[in-house]
Amino acid sequence: MRPPHALSVVDLDLDSPDGPVLSLRPAPGGPPPGPGDVYALVRLRGRPAATVLAHIPEGADPAETLAALARARLNEPPSDEPRRDESRIPGSRPDQPHLVPPRASVVVASRERADQLARALDSLLDQDHPDYEILVVDNAPVTRDTEELVRGKYGDRVRYVREDTPGLAVAHNTGLAHARTEVVAFTDDDVVADPRWLTALTAPFAADPRLGCVTGLILPARLRTPAQILLESHGGFAKGFAPRLYDPVRPPADEPLFPFTAGSFGSGANMAFRAGALASAGGFDPATGTGTAARGGDDLYAFVAVLSAGFRLRYTADALVWHHHRESRQDLRNQAFGYGAGLTAYLTAALVRRPALLPALLARLPRGLVHAKNMTASRTAEHGGVPGEHGTHTHPWPRSLSRLERRGMLYGPFGYAKARLRMRGTR
C-alpha cells in the first residue's frame, strides 16, 4: 500500500470552461506549483467551480496541465443524481452579484494560538465587504498572548473580548452578544479567508428575509502530511460546489433524516447567521463544542435549531476559506473521536432542548439508516478531485480511526450530560 505523500495546493482561475487561464497561484502561503502531484481549486472568473488532481511532469507547464484537466472536469455531463430545483423557491437564486451585503460582524474564537490567529486576522482584514467588524473572543486564556496580539498589532481594527468559561459554543454566544450587526459570521483561527468570503457569505441574507443561516466552502490550505491527506481523502470539510437551499417547509427528498443531517449543511469554520434568527432559536448550546466534555457538535446543533425554528439555510461555494488541517496522526485520532462524539452530543442536545423533535427523528430513522450507507461515497463524488478516495487501496481510511469515531458516538451523550452538569456549576 502506497503511503500518502505531500501534494502542492494551488488556485487556478479560468475565463470559462473552455477559455484561457486567468491566473495560477499557490494556496495562501504555499509554495508555487512545480513537478509532482498537485491539488487544485478551479475557479471560473473568480468563482469556485471544482477541484482536480494532477501530476505535473518535469518540464511541463503547470498552468496548461491543470487547465486541460479542469476543462475536462467542467465539461463532464451532469451527474444523474437528483438536484433540488431552486428556481421556484423565493430568494434561492445562486447568482445575485448586485446585492449589497448587510453590515456584518465576524467572530473568531481562539485559545492560545496567537500565531495562527494573526494569519487568520490578516486575511479577514483584507475582505472586499463594504461594512464589517471583527471580534476575537479569547476563550479561557492561560496567557495574555492573544490579548497582546489583538490590542498591540490590530488596535481599533479588531475588538478583543475575553470569555473565561471554556467551550467553543460559549465563546460563540459571547461573540454573538457583543456583535453590533444584523448578520454575524463565524470562522476559526486556523483558516485563511478568501477576499470575497464575507461578501459571498452575507449577501444572500439581503435577498431572503426567511434565511437564518449561510454556510460556505472549506478547502485544505496544505496537504503536506499523511494526516492532512487522510482527512481530505475522507471528504475533509468540503460540501461540494452546487448551491443548496434547505427549507423546513420543503424538506429535501434526497436527505431522509432532514433536518438531522446537519453534517451535510456546513461546518463551524465557515458559517453566518441572522442574529435574530439564531437568538430566537436559543443560540449555541453551551454544553457542546470543542473545550467541553461533549467534544464538538456546537455548529450542528445551531444549524438544526435554526431550521427547527422555521428559518432557511443556504450553502454556497462562493464563500471560501482555506483550512489548515491538523498535521499529526494523534491530531487525526483526536479529531476522529471528536467527530463521533460531537455527532451524538448534538443529537442529544437537540432532543433534550427540543423534545418535540423526537417523533420526527423516529419517523425518519428507518429511511435515514438506509440512506446513510451511501453518504460518504456521494459526498466524495460531488467534492470532485480528492487525494485518494475513502475505502480505496490508495489512501484508505484506517479502521482504527473508524473505531475511534464509533467510540466517540457512544461517548457523545455522556459527554454532553457531563458538560451540562459542569455548566450548571459555573452559574
Image: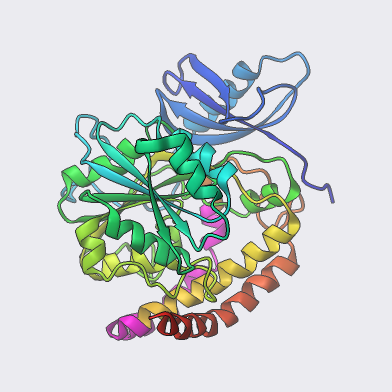
Q: Nearer the viewer, residue 179 or 262?
A: 179
Please tell me in which quadrant of the rendered image residue 286 appears.
Answer: bottom left
Q: Is residue 259 above or below residue 188?
A: below
Q: Nearer the viewer, residue 52 or 99?
A: 99
User: What colour scheme was applied to this rendering of the protein?
Assistant: rainbow
Q: Residue at x 40, y 67 (%)?
A: 170
Q: Residue at x 67, y 14 (%)?
A: 61
Q: Is residue 410 above or below residue 259?
A: below
Q: x, y (%) of residue 162?
A: 42, 58
The region drawn magenta spans: 352-379
Q: x, y (%) of residue 267?
A: 45, 55
Q: Is residue 267 visible?
A: no
Q: Nearer the viewer, residue 150 or 182?
A: 150
Task: Answer left or right for 71 relative to 104.
Answer: right
Q: Residue at x 18, y 43 (%)?
A: 206
Disc tally is 0
Task: Answer left or right for 207 relative to 24.
Answer: left
Q: x, y (%) of residue 183?
A: 25, 49
Q: Is residue 407 visible?
A: yes
Q: Nearer the viewer, residue 76 or 2?
A: 2
Please tell me in which quadrant of the rendered image residue 16 appears.
Answer: top left
Question: Magenta segment, principal secondary structure?
Answer: helix
Q: Is residue 363 magenta?
A: yes
Q: x, y (%) of residue 108?
A: 43, 50
Q: Residue at x 67, y 43 (%)?
A: 387
Task: Answer left or right for 103 relative to 154.
Answer: left
User: Which quadrant of the rendered structure holds the C terminus?
Assistant: bottom left
Q: Is residue 221 magenta?
A: no
